[in-house]
Amino acid sequence: MSSERADGQPSHDTVRIRSVDAEEAGQRLDELTTVLRDAVDSGSSINFLDHATDDDLAAFWRSSVEDLAAGNRVLIVADTGTQYVGTAMVVFASQQNSRHRADVAKMIVHRGYQRRGIASQLLVAIDEVALAHGRTLLMLDTETDSAGEHLYAANGWIRFGEVPGHAHSPDGTLKPTTFFYRVLEPPLTGSAP
Ligand SMILES: CC(C)(COP(=O)(O)OP(=O)(O)OC[C@H]1O[C@@H](n2cnc3c(N)ncnc32)[C@H](O)[C@@H]1OP(=O)(O)O)[C@@H](O)C(=O)NCCC(=O)NCCS
């Protein structure tokens, strides 16, 4: 996603969606942590509680960077050119019988950049990354009736269930979780008969 001014220069709000490698992610852990901090502070159910420290959040990203380096996941960011304002990860299932599957994790857009279609663009990139790695079944879960649930439903993901009392919000309240999946069609190859 990007926007340009009439004079052809990138606007202040230009946001580029792109994958980043482990080296870059490792160098920009602070920015990744800031995005995750914003999600926790906004009360989003994103695996952390209110009392999580920045060190806890950075430790999560450090471990994700190790997974990136090992090729077990791909990190996609929304980047203004000076800072990351969004993240999403495609986490490849490792089981022998599930090499067609991946989970989506840490879909986050910083509050200062929400409702501009950035998460929808991240979802397009997720599809592309998954297909490029031969993953045709995507899965995720999100807090019921959250912005995430609305986002996935609006982008064609299929709800397949809700589990009451599945996870705690950052403030400790137990909340239900809704589960989604998405089937991707590999692009047709070869010439038409
Ligand atoms: C969920 C989240 C990633 C959405 O990011 P975003 O960039 O604002 O989403 P988009 O602008 O692409 O929204 C696309 C559509 O999703 C739906 N949607 C997104 N946020 C919504 C909200 N807060 N309430 C209702 N619908 C919402 C709308 O249909 C929206 O289209 P519209 O703006 O034309 O109405 C963002 O709110 C966020 O980071 N939340 C905190 C972290 C989180 O909960 N992540 C999900 C965990 S699985």
Image (cartoon, grey):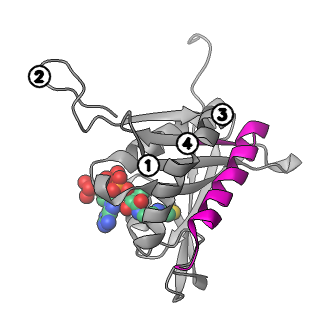
Which quarter of the frame holds ligand 1?
A: bottom left
Q: Earlier in the sequence, mark 1 or mark 2?
A: 2
Visible in this render: residue 148? no
Mark 1 to mark 2 CA distance (whole Å) = 26 Å
Mark 1 vs ligand 1: CB under 8 Å? yes
Which residue type carries mark 4?
Arg
Q: Earlier in the sequence, mark 3 or mark 4?
A: 3
Single out the mark in the foreground, 3 or 1.
3
Which residue type carries mark 2?
Ala
Mark 2 surroundings: few (<14), some (14-19) or many (≥20) residues within 10 A: few
Residue 103, how many percent across, how many down? 65, 54
Q: Secondary structure at mark 4?
A: loop
Which portion, as a residue range, is magenta?
50-75
Mark 2 vs ligand 1: CB under 8 Å? no
Tell which of 88 and 131 is nearer to you.
88
Tell which of 63 and 121 is nearer to you.
63
Which residue type carries mark 3?
Glu
Which residue does the numbered mark 1 point to in the structure image? 86
3 on left or right of 177 = left
Mark 2 to mark 4 CA distance (whole Å) = 31 Å
Which residue is at a point 66% across and 59% down the rendered structure image? 60
Which residue does the numbered mark 2 point to in the structure image? 6
Q: Earlier in the sequence, mark 3 or mark 1?
A: 3
Mark 2 to mark 3 CA distance (whole Å) = 35 Å
Q: Earlier in the sequence, mark 2 or mark 4?
A: 2
Which residue type carries mark 1?
Gly
Which residue is at a point 16% across and 26% down the rendered structure image? 5
